[in-house]
Amino acid sequence: AQTVTQSQPEMSVQEAETVTLSCTYDTSENNYYLFWYKQPPSRQMILVIRQEAYKQQNATENRFSVNFQKAAKSFSLKISDSQLGDTAMYFCAFVTNTGNQFYFGTGTSLTVIP
Amino acid sequence: ETGVTQTPRHLVMGMTNKKSLKCEQHLGHNAMYWYKQSAKKPLELMFVYSLEERVENNSVPSRFSPECPNSSHLFLHLHTLQPEDSALYLCASSQAWGFKSNEQFFGPGTRLTVL
């Protein structure tokens, strides 16, 4: 079964601090993409960062970076220098190269505290 | 914005009503999706259209009926819904279907309340 687990339903962080959101997934496939999506309150879900499973180097996008541990099937998101605009639901997801369905976790609600 | 629009943004309907949700994408994508988002649950994929053909139908009750008249528009027709169908319904699009696209673009969603 293809599943995504986000074990932290809610998190908070002080502005300018660093926070890490955890994600584990389960798939028997060897090639897939992993994603973190951000859904701000009452706004559209947007892609934060993407990682290809065959790439060992962790993806980074400005203040956002991932820690991809393929053997452990772990894909955590680190947000550095947290800003108020980072307050949102964050969803971890993946799609495999043999399936065509995106699998999403239940989300982590992140609040950045001024 | 992501280039995917949805109307209406909010909808309240009774169990005997018939209504439709509309999605439009301005990105030239070939695949479009309907998801149901409920609190504390993963996004549930409902339907996928690729090149205007339905390619996925994840055991969705027949009271939900999708329609894709062209590659830019997607509808979800609703009929005799149940209160447990209350949720945020998200539309998404991608360049191609599934792995080949490697990114989906989401609309703002329609918040549906069934009384």
Image (tube, helix red, strand yellow):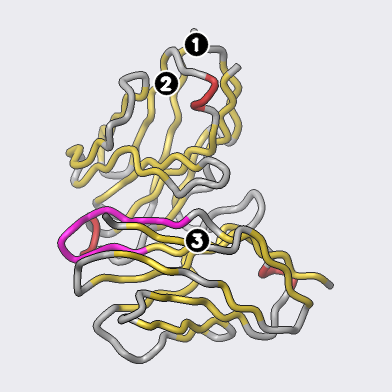
Pointer 1 chain:
B
Rendered position, B96 above or below B79 = below
In the displayed structure image, the side of residue A75 where residue B87 appears, left or right: right
Q: Which residue is mark 2?
A: B78
Q: Residue B38's x, y, as percent?
A: 53, 40
| Identity of the residue drawn at 47% across and 86% down | A60
Residue stretch rendered in magenta on the structure: A94-105
Packing grade of label 2 (10 A; few <14, some 14-19, many >=20) is some
Q: Residue B22's x, y, as percent?
A: 43, 33
Q: Secondary structure at mark 3?
A: strand
Packing grade of label 3 (10 A; few <14, some 14-19, many >=20) is many
Q: Nearer the viewer, mark 3 or mark 1?
A: 3
Rendered position, A38 above or below B5 = below
Q: Residue A93's x, y, as percent?
A: 40, 62
Q: Which residue is mark 3?
A: A91
Please check the rendered image and state whether residue A102 is part of the magenta-colored stretch, yes or no. Answer: yes
Rendered position, A109 above or below B89 = below
Q: Residue B10's x, y, as percent?
A: 60, 32
Q: Which mark is residue B17?
A: 1
Q: Amino acid at mark 2?
A: Leu
Point out the image quarter for the C terminus of chain A.
bottom right
| Identity of the residue drawn at 35% across and 56% down | A103
| Identity of the residue drawn at 37% across and 40% down | B34
Q: CA distance from mark 2 to mark 1?
A: 8 Å
